[in-house]
Image: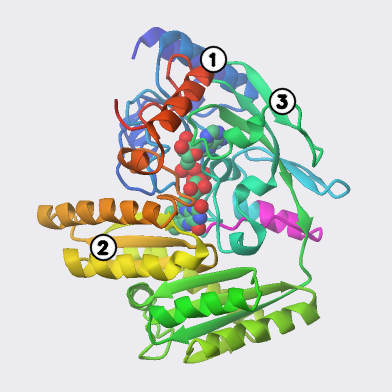
Amino acid sequence: MAAAFADALRSLVGPAFVSDDEATRRAYGVDALGIGHPADLVVRPANTAEIAGIARLCHEHRIPLVVRGAGTGYTGGAVPTAGGVVLSMERLDRIIEIDEVNLLAVVEPNVITGDLQRAVEAVGLFYPPDPASLDTSSIGGNVAECAGGPRAFKYGVTRRYVLGLEAVLPTGEIIRTGSKAVKNVVGYDLTQLLVGSEGTLAIITRITLRLIPKPPAYRTALATFTGIQGAVDAVSALVARRVIPAALELIDQDSIEAVQQHTGEALVPAGTGAVLILETDGTPAAVEEEMARAADACRAAGALAVTAAASDAERDRIWAVRRAVSLALKATGLTKVNHDVVVPRGRVPDLFAVVADLRARHGLRIASFGHAGDGNIHVNIMIDGSDPDARARATAAERTLFEQVVALEGSISGEHGIGFAKKPYIGLELSPDEIALMRRVKAAFDPRGILNPGKMFPDA
Ligand SMILES: Cc1cc2nc3c(=O)[nH]c(=O)nc-3n(C[C@H](O)[C@H](O)[C@H](O)COP(=O)(O)OP(=O)(O)OC[C@H]3O[C@@H](n4cnc5c(N)ncnc54)[C@H](O)[C@@H]3O)c2cc1C
């Protein structure tokens, strides 16, 4: 990289905020996918004006520019696969405003999701999107990936809460999309175009989020089943009874065992083959009534037991199990090839049939867990990563999984995005015309293709 370019960056943001040492370049070159590539330079700007200057410089010098939030992404979105500059948003981490009259918050992108939730809950408000990574991921990353979480079943994903954005184009202009009003139909909806754009269209520098009143009460329960089928039947029974819990999470036997191994605790009775975590929220009367109906549905589907949390500590313990699954699977020492496929809710039983078939046909260990309520299941193929044969079987299973999910009218990613990990497969879901249109949108924002190159689209 030309010394003149690095010097220009240093004079723009200050030399202390531009790093080129090996350790930093590697640390900022990897995300939770675990397959990294070092950046050439890491820059940590303080504000939107500096970010606009960095974009202009990169555009002018045709240097790849990759935005990094908290680096918890699962598809390599923040990895600088083509080298260049990693632009870390870590210094833009302020909650600028919580507007209790208009029910909204204005934040900088690197506010940690859980910190925002706690801040708004302190004044009786609620920001529902709750990715399991909420204590480590940033709102900017959540917006760029359109993150979801257990509460998406009832409350929807990040997209539903984004009212407006400030963003820097890869050519250096600063744009403002949407507004603070809840209605806005002027022009194309650039706000929603940027949500889920995985850092390929613009650099999001400020976010206006819709809030709702905090539900006054909640009830949480753990239902155990002998196997996946019972848990899946319970989901259908719940919906048939018109119960939409705030959360409905499924964990299969492989995942439960990994958590038990990781924590050293027996979390469920022996013989448990699957669990559902249910949470209802609303007024005290409504949560009790809904939970009673939900528990009935679980029992009708053959639940071994439905145990309600008797205290906040018990509730936290139940959720800690769910949030530990991902890390516990990683801690098995096997390579976790992570997928977050989604099917229409009614096709969840078909999805599990596909998974059982893949397991048998390819001789693979597959651990599944996730958001049963909205059909978004994390299917994790667990392999010895050093075994080329296991890798080949996992790759074959992955393609079949994606083909089958699309055949079930679902999608190959519900919330983790495409990054570089899933880009070979988007043609299974999108037509050549749709991909070509998306490439033209990308070119309109980023004519020189400098922003997060090599992501989302299949290689030419
Ligand atoms: C243990 C664990 C559990 C997880 N659970 C969930 C879950 O339940 N639901 C879920 O949806 N995800 C989950 N994830 C995935 C991950 O946390 C989310 O994708 C999250 O939204 C990424 O946020 P981040 O700040 O870490 O973004 P990063 O990983 O830093 O970046 C992700 C992408 O967003 C882009 N980006 C980041 N900030 C900006 C910005 N300001 N402007 C433009 N582009 C930007 C990057 O370029 C990159 O393409 C989990 C991850 C882990 C490790």
Whether residue 334 appears in this view of the structure is no
The stretch drawn in magenta includes residue 127: yes
Ranked by sequence position, the earlier of labels 3 and 2 is: 3
Give the labeled residue for mark 2: 382
Residue 52 lies, in percent from the top left, at 59, 18
Relative to 71, does residue 164 appear above or below in the rendering?
Answer: above
Residue drawn at (40%, 50%), measured in percent from left and top? 412
Residue drawn at (49%, 17%), measured in percent from left and top? 10
Label 3, ligand 1: CB separation under 8 Å: no
Measure the C-alpha gap from mark 1 to mark 2. Answer: 42 Å
Could you tell me which secondary element the residue under label 1 belongs to?
loop
Whether pointer 3 and pointer 2 mark residues with C-beta atoms closer than 8 Å, the reply is no
Ranked by sequence position, the earlier of labels 3 and 1 is: 1
Q: Which of marks 3 and 1 is in front?
A: 3
Quadrant of the drawing holding the C terminus: top left
Give the labeled residue for mark 1: 171
